[in-house]
Image (spheres, rainbow, N blue to C red):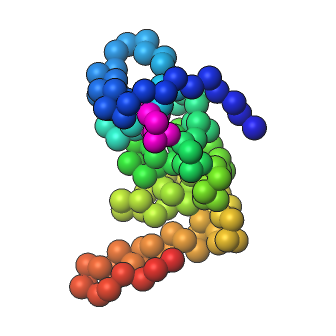
Amino acid sequence: MNTYKITIVDHEIVYAIANNLYEGFNSWKIMSMRGWSVAHEATKTTVLPLDFELWALGNREGWLVAHEAARNNTLPSGFNQWGLMGRVGLSVAHVAATSGSGYLPADFDQWELTNKRGLSVKDVHEKYQKELAQREEGYESIPF
């Protein structure tokens, strides 16, 4: 289990820091009282470097920085830590497969990774793509 020294601040400070990053910034572990880190917040608008070392940093619920980057489609090109899984029981690949347009890179080859419910990335991706198609046709959402 990874352990990190965390600095706790108000969420507004986390937001302000994440939206004012500078060259060489390295205080990614500053976290709000709600458990949201500067790194989590930064992925909303920033592609973190491929050699970023805190992809597995989780918030209180176990949502990883890599999960948030996948949800925001801000994973760097060449990212390969698809199997990272926090306490939420989802791999980064599962999150990427069900975020936005269901982005996974063309060379993605880890379709058989499973989440805590035993569903593979392939299964989840196919269900999500079907849901997207039905939304475009005006149908109700299909729950996973």
The percent position of residue 122, horizontal first and vertical second, equals 59, 69
Is residue 80 at least partly visible in the picture? Answer: no
Q: Quadrant of the N terminus?
A: top right
The percent position of residue 105, horizontal first and vertical second, equals 49, 52
- The residue stretch that appears in magenta: 32-40
Residue 37 located within the stretch drawn in magenta = yes
Q: Residue at the spot x=56%, y=55% of the render?
A: 93
Of residues 67 and 50, the one nearer the viewer is 67
Quarter of image, res 90: bottom right
In the shown orientation, is residue 141 left or right of residue 39?
left
All told, the count of numbered labels is: 0
Is residue 136 at least partly visible in the picture? Answer: yes
Q: Residue at the spot x=46%, y=80% of the render?
A: 143
The percent position of residue 7, horizontal first and vertical second, equals 52, 23
Residue 15 located within the stretch drawn in magenta = no
Q: Residue at the spot x=35%, y=74% of the render?
A: 132
In the orientation shown, which residue stands out farthest toward the bottom?
139
Q: Residue at the spot x=46%, y=41% of the render?
A: 34
The percent position of residue 106, horizontal first and vertical second, equals 49, 54
In the shown orientation, is residue 78 left or right of residue 17?
right
Of residues 23 and 34, the one nearer the viewer is 34
Q: In the rendered view, would you say 128 is above or below 40?
A: below
Q: In the rendered view, would you say 12 is above or below 117?
A: above
Quarter of image, res 128: bottom left
Of residues 37 and 100, the one nearer the viewer is 37
In the orientation shown, which residue stands out farthest toward the top?
24
